[in-house]
Amino acid sequence: MRDSPFAYFDETAPGPINQARGKILNLSPRALVVLELLRASGAALTTSMLAWYLGCKKQAMQRNMYSLQRAGLAYLLDCFRDGHSVRVWLASTIPVPSTRESARLAALGLLYLRLRSEHEKLGWETLPGALARMVINKEHLVEPVRRGEKPNGKATLLVHPTMEEARQNTPGGKLYTADTVLLSGDADIMFR
């Protein structure tokens, strides 16, 4: 993969945001799992990432996402860049993010699902400014550095769009990975 679809976004457009109905909903077990993932991650997740994580077809996952949207429990955000679009989903408890923050939340969502698939006891908390506190063996402050941004001095793990950008822009002593590595499906998530 040459570039990350989450490197940056030029524009975003939220889909319809419904209000939760306040009554018992008839949601599938998979939709409930997805809702828990959206809330636990505090990030933006794509249908493809969720389908990969749960081991189902993208079309089946799409139906679950729309049922969560109709119930007012999640909303979609269409993100545009250079004539291409990416659709991400967020829990309804998360305010509609800015364009810059949307790209950062999508990168955090990608990292969250990859780590959760490998570490059952992953500790994760999304912080203001689209940062995350992650605990596996020790605690890390995670920052998704998008194209054209400078890294936060406090972050211990940086997520760049590509490995080239990660190697060039990561200060010494920091761990890093890239969207392209996380999207590649390789068994190992590299933290250098």
Image: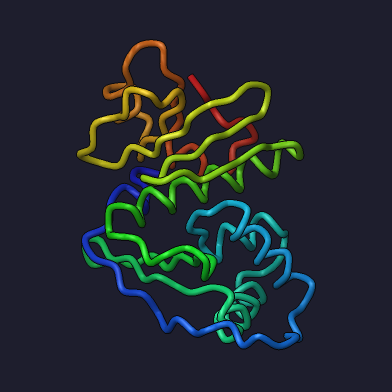
Q: Position of residue 70 (x, y in %)?
A: 57, 86
- Closer to us: 153 or 172: 153
Horizontally, residue 37 falls left or right of residue 42, namely right
* Residue 184 appears in the rendering: no
Q: Vertically, is 48 above or below 135? A: below
Q: Residue at x 52, y 41 (%)?
A: 182
Q: Position of residue 56 (x, y in %)?
A: 71, 66
Task: Indicate the colouring scheme.
Answer: rainbow
Q: Residue at x 47, y 63 (%)?
A: 94
Q: Residue at x 59, y 60 (%)?
A: 38
Horizontally, residue 98 falls left or right of residue 157, namely left
- Closer to us: 11 or 56: 11
Q: Vertically, is 33 above or below 24? A: above
Quadrant where the image shows the N terminus: top left
Q: Residue at x 44, y 53 (%)?
A: 106
Q: Position of residue 13 (x, y in %)?
A: 31, 74
Residue 123 falls in image quadrant: top right
